[in-house]
């Protein structure tokens, strides 16, 4: 089991995973709301749908920025970003997405399996090397 380099990396991983999950919930909700508002002809509801769309877009941009720096400690590939590199042959998807599987692992299990090198990583900071004390 590998560990992440520092506490700030742990926070970055958690935030990127949270944004990815919220995006996966918000985007379909926004589309459903827009279709429904057009169906019942409610301009107020359509406006909320557009607002939700803008929010989703901002979350996508923020997630894109943060996940670019959330790298696997072993192969240094950003596991929460959209990469078209070939995946490990045993890597599995969740709802058709490798990233979502990593995000769910980060948020709920506290560890994830890198889809590129297939190595497990615990979402916690590596202990610092003991400092030499003078006597
Ligand atoms: Zn990796």
Image (cartoon, rainbow, N blue to C red):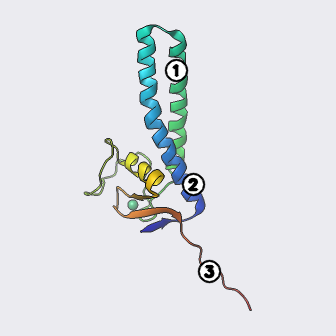
User: Circle 3 — which element?
Assistant: loop
Per the image, the residue denoted by label 2 is 11
Which residue: 50% across, 54% down?
70
Can residue 69 be seen here? The reply is no
Q: Earlier in the sequence, mark 2 or mark 3?
A: 2
Task: Provide residue 127's location: percent of width, then percent of height.
Answer: 56, 72
Find disc 1 in the rendering and name its residue. 50
Dot 2 falls on a residue whose secondary structure is helix
Residue contact at pointers 2 and 3, CB within 8 angstroms: no
Q: CA distance from mark 2 to mark 3?
A: 23 Å
On screen, 99 above or below 76? above
10 on left or right of 31: right
Q: Residue furthest bottom?
A: 135
Q: Is residue 6 above or below residue 51?
A: below
User: Disc 3 marks which residue?
Assistant: 130
State which tag comes first along the sequence, 3 or 1.
Answer: 1
Residue farthest to the top, as pictured: 41
Q: Residue at 50% across / 20% down in the picture?
A: 49
Q: Secondary structure at mark 1?
A: helix
Residue 126: percent from the left, percent from the top?
54, 69
Residue at figure coordinates x 74%, y 92% from the top left:
135
């Amino acid at each position: 089991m590998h560990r992440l380099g520092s506490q700030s990396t742990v926070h970055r991983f958690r935030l990127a995973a949270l944004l990815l999950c919220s995006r996966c919930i918000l985007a379909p909700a926004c589309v459903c709301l827009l279709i429904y508002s057009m169906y019942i002809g409610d301009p107020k509801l359509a406006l909320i749908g557009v607002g939700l769309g803008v929010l989703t877009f901002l979350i996508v941009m923020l997630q894109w920025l943060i996940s670019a720096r959330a790298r696997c400690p072993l192969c240094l590939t950003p596991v929460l970003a959209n990469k078209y590199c070939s995946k490990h042959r045993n890597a599995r998807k969740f709802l058709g997405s490798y990233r979502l599987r990593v995000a769910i692992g980060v948020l709920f299990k506290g560890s994830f399996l890198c889809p590129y090198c297939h190595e497990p990583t615990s979402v916690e900071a590596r202990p610092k090397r003991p400092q030499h004390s003078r006597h």
